[in-house]
Amino acid sequence: MASVNYELHTLRQGRWALDSIYAEQDREKAINEAQMMERSAYIEAVKVVKDTFDPRRGMSTETVVYSSRPRDTGEGGRYRPRRVYRPVARHRASTKKSAPVAAPRAPGTAVSTHSPWPFLVKLFAIVVVSLILASLTSTAYIRLFY
C-alpha cells in the first residue's frame, strides 16, 4: 500500500526548502499553514506537495496541490523583505569620552581576542618537563654503563 504525505516548501532568498511534513489526513492543515506563511515578510512563495511512495516499486511521485505566486523580487532577482520600523532608544549626551571606533574589517576575517600568555606558559612547561626527563635518562644511562 502506498504511503502519502504532504510537504510544505518555502522559497526564501531564491532557494526552496522543506519546512514541514503533514500526514495524509492533514491535507487541509498543510494548505492552511501555507496560506498563513505566504503572508510572512521573509517568505517569497510557498507550495504544498503531495508525496506518494509506492514501496512495491520503490518509486515516489510528487504532485503540487497548492502553490502561491512568487512575490515581486525587485532588482537582481532577490526578494527584499519589508522594512519594519522600531522605536529607537534615545540617550542623553554623555560627558565621558567615547571609545575610539575600530576600522572596518574585511568580510570573513576573524578578530583575535586571545592572549599569547597561555601558549607561552604551556610551552615553558613542556620545555621544563623535557629537560627533567633528559637529565633523568642521562643520569640512569651513566650509572648503568659506566
Image (spheres, grey):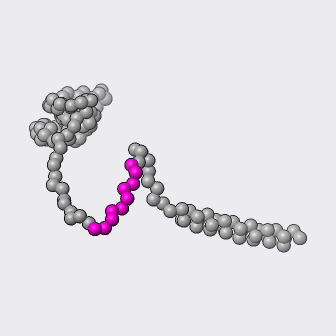
Against 29, is 133 above or below? below
The part of the chain drawn in magenta is 95-104
Residue 25 coordinates in the image, percent (x, y): 13, 39
Q: Does the segment drawn in magenta span residue 97?
A: yes
Viewer-proximal residue among 71 and 129: 71
Against 72, is 142 above or below? below
Residue 31 coordinates in the image, percent (x, y): 12, 37
Please give the name of the residue rendered at 20% of the width and 35% of the height, measured from the top-left corner.
Answer: 44
Q: Does the segment drawn in magenta span residue 29?
A: no
Q: Quadrant of the C terminus?
A: bottom right
Tell me, yes or no, if residue 3 can be seen here. no
Viewer-proximal residue among 24 and 113: 113
Residue 112 coordinates in the image, percent (x, y): 46, 56
Res 132 → quadrant: bottom right
Please give the name of the residue rendered at 15% of the width and 38% of the height, measured from the top-left corner.
Answer: 38
Residue 141 coordinates in the image, percent (x, y): 82, 68
In the displayed structure image, the side of residue 33 where residue 138 appears, left or right: right
In the displayed structure image, the side of residue 1 where residue 35 appears, left or right: left
Against 58, is 20 above or below? below
Tell me, yes or no, if residue 81 can be seen here. yes
The residue sitting at the right extreme is: 146
User: Main SS of the magenta segment?
Assistant: loop
